[in-house]
Image (cartoon, grey):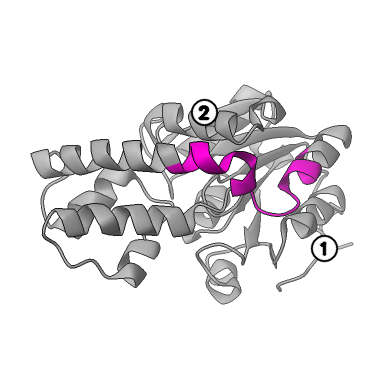
Amino acid sequence: MAGTTAVPGPVRRGVIFDLDGTVADTAPAITAVTAEILTGMGRSPVESEIRARVGRPLDQNFAELLGVPPGHQDVTAAMDHYRRLFGAHVRSRGRGLLFPGVVSGLLQLREGGRKLGIATSKVHAAAVRTVELTEIRDQFDAIAGHDSVPRGKPHPDMAWKVAKDLGLAPRECVVVGDGIGDIEMGVAAGMATIGVSYGVAGATDLLAAGADTVVDSFDAVVTAVLSSVPAGA
């Protein structure tokens, strides 16, 4: 349940984080920027519909919201505009875009001997740029984006790639995310999963997706990872 402070199973040497809504508090900006672009294209965006899509591939989101195929020229134009506006927002916020406890928590995990990675539905270049602008790039040993693997979330490919890049087996890793797709990816990959309820999805939905535990802060993520216990203990 929410607030549980240990993950069952072997000690998790690898921690694979989602980025948006888990490490960086980007959901409000993603929602606002997307709405601005859709309005400029003559649409009447519904904020709740946009927010529900946070954490999914950008081209898929715009295609659905615009009602056109993913390869349509309107999708390409919207994505180009989005990247300019969102990039400016990230640059203006810098480290202030991170959730409370992220900077110290990442350091604590590394000091505890954990290898850290990111698996995000952003394209790889955008993910790298985000962690660079928020000044946490050096904390991560591996980063995979939607374009890094044949299949994105909720398929296991991205989690498997990050685990391989970390030099670890799936059973040695835990996936941490705020979205249903994050948890489903981790479960499909044979990894432990921690849901965070401070992002897009709520605790009930994260548990229903198969999360081993759900926590409500990044500090609690760190506690859960560092308190890994044998199953059944």
Q: Report the magenta residues as a range.
A: 89-106
In the rendering, which numbered label is found on residue 108?
A: none
In the foreground, 60 or 85: 85
The location of residue 45, given as percent across then percent down, is 23, 66
Q: Is residue 94 left or right of 225 when viewed as pictured?
A: left
Res 8 seen here:
no
Q: Which mark is residue 5?
A: 1
Q: Is 145 covered by the magenta stretch?
A: no
Say whether residue 152 is left or right of residue 79: right
Residue at position x 39%, y 63% from top? 51
Residue 65 in picture, x, y percent from top left:
21, 59
Q: Residue at x 52, y 72 (%)?
A: 205
Residue at 61% across / 65% down in the picture? Answer: 198
Q: Quadrant of the C terminus?
A: bottom right
Q: Residues within 10 Å of mark 1 (few under 14, many from 20)?
A: some
Residue 195 seen by the camera: yes
